[in-house]
Image: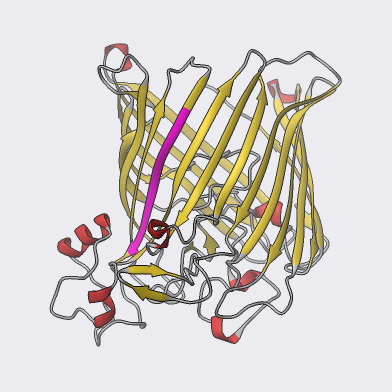
């Protein structure tokens, strides 16, 4: 891969599970293995492993392990330990902008997870009601800028009304993420410890207010334990003979404002349209996505706590105690359109230690994919943003940004069949340096 400067264009490195370097030109080699073995008749029990290694050769040469896990599956349930690439939430995970709380922009967090592998029918509903859920706990990286020994809790529950082959299906559910435990120099006692131990873990899981222990500070006794965030998701899927239409909305929550309907304007809205049939034309569009992300409301510019109603200045992905925020190895875990302060041209003293200085964003995104000359697959992502900074430190003016990518891939007959792929990407605007770049790669799969 190469670029016209010292930075990798946005869509070349965003939502790539943290595997693409951000410092311009580089070479990369990757190898992976994923395999499952039946342990019982009819594949009721299966065991599996997954390993992926990425070696990036650039100014900062690194070897990464975006996947390394052991998995045990029983029917539609699985227990895994380690890192695994996952999609989360009711949103498009291919050519969309990324699910708001969990976009695939950062390396997967190592964790232990128990959950379903797909939507599973609820007994006695004849397949009309199904659910998909998981529960997990993990650890954040060592050497974070502010916190250390930080722990991770995550869970999700989604329901579907409608059978697999129903013309109309309704979806709803939530996901919940918590950064808790660990140590921080901010709003903690003399020890620097954030609330930890089993009682505080239960408080983090249920989002209750007030920590437990002898060294609990005023902040911890009047706030929820840890940094909580997630989304409430609603969606509808409409099936016709030729087309599948998926409409979705993710409502953002962080500190309780959504409960009082003060942040309902904020969230990710989208529609995805897929064609079910191909007619062999020389140029075809097989799938399209249009999305709008809005995070400028945040309950308003004034923080008030009246009659138990908490609202205003939600400051998405930042936290007063976890100042390095909703990040993993300096990459946003959620939407990449709320970037680390370190990655933009806009540096503000008041946010020198905060994770992001730009979480009030309007984004318009379009994604398309299809075929060309019947044998070339193509895709494009085109994104425009208007950026206002934060309530505490607004940008001077409203810098805008355009980022786009066009990718192609095709099969070639060399060595029994390989995939040749390439892409062109560009950034133009006021948030990032103007940049153009390209990638060129080749991939070989070995099924067994």
Q: Farthest residue toward the front?
A: 307
Tell me the quarter of the picture where residue 47 sits: top left
Q: Nearer the viewer, residue 13 or 242?
A: 242
Position of residue 425 measured from the top left corner of the image (x, y, whole percent):
78, 51
Q: Is residue 153 above or below residue 282?
A: below
Tell me the quarter of the picture where residue 389 sits: bottom right
Is 6 part of what is drawn in magenta?
Answer: no
Q: Is residue 235 above or below residue 42?
A: below
Is 171 part of what is drawn in magenta?
Answer: yes
Q: Is residue 340 above or below residue 173?
A: below
Q: Residue at the location (52% across, 31% down)?
A: 236
Tell me the quarter of the picture where residue 309 sits: bottom left
Position of residue 147 measured from the top left corner of the image (x, y, whole percent):
38, 74
Q: Main secondary structure of the magenta part?
A: strand
Position of residue 305 measured from the top left corner of the image (x, y, whole percent):
36, 74
Answer yes or no: is residue 422 visible. Answer: yes
Q: Residue at the location (25% across, 16% down)?
A: 124
Q: Which residues are magenta?
A: 170-179
Q: Farthest residue toward the left?
A: 214
């Amino acid at each position: 891969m190469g670029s016209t400067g010292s930075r990798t264009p946005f869509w070349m490195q965003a939502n790539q599970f943290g595997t693409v370097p951000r410092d311009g030109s580089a070479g990369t080699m990757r190898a992976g293995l994923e395999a499952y073995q039946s342990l019982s008749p009819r594949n009721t029990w299966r065991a599996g492993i997954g390993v992926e290694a990425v070696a990036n050769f650039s100014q900062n040469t690194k070897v990464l392990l975006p996947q390394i896990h052991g998995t045990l599956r029983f029917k539609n349930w699985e227990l895994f330990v380690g890192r695994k690439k996952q999609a989360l939430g009711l949103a498009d995970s291919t050519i969309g902008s990324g699910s708001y709380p969990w976009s695939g922009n950062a390396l997967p967090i190592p964790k232990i997870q128990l959950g379903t592998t797909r939507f599973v029918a609820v007994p006695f509903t004849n397949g009309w009601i199904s659910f998909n859920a998981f529960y997990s706990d993990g650890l954040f990286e060592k050497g974070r800028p502010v916190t250390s020994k930080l722990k991770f809790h995550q869970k999700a529950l989604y329901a579907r009304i409608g059978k697999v082959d129903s013309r109309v299906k309704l979806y709803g559910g939530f996901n919940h993420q918590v950064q808790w435990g660990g140590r921080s120099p901010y709003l903690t006692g003399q020890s620097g410890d954030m609330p930890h131990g089993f009682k505080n873990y239960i408080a983090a899981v249920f989002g209750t207010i007030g920590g437990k222990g002898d060294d609990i500070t005023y902040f911890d006794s009047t706030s929820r334990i840890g940094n909580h965030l997630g989304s409430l998701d609603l969606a509808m899927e409409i099936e016709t003979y030729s087309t599948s239409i998926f409409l979705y909305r993710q409502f953002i929550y962080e500190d309780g404002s959504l409960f009082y309907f003060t942040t309902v304007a904020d969230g990710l809205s989208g529609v995805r349209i897929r064609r079910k049939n191909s007619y062999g034309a020389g140029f075809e569009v097989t799938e399209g996505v249009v999305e709008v992300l809005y995070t400028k409301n945040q309950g308003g510019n004034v923080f008030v706590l009246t009659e138990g109603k908490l609202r205003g200045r939600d400051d998405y992905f930042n936290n007063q105690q976890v100042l390095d925020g909703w990040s993993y190895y300096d990459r946003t875990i959620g939407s990449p359109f709320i970037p680390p302060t370190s990655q933009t041209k806009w540096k503000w003293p008041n946010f020198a230690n905060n994770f992001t200085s730009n979480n009030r964003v309007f984004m318009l995104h379009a994604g398309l994919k299809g075929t060309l000359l019947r044998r070339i697959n193509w895709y494009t992502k085109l994104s425009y943003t208007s950026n206002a900074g934060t309530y505490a430190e607004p940008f001077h003016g409203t810098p805008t940004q355009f980022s786009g990518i066009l990718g192609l891939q095709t099969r070639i007959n060399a060595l029994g069949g390989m995939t040749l792929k390439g892409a062109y990407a560009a950034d133009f605007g006021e948030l990032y340096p103007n940049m153009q770049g390209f990638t060129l790669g080749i991939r070989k799969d070995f099924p067994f």
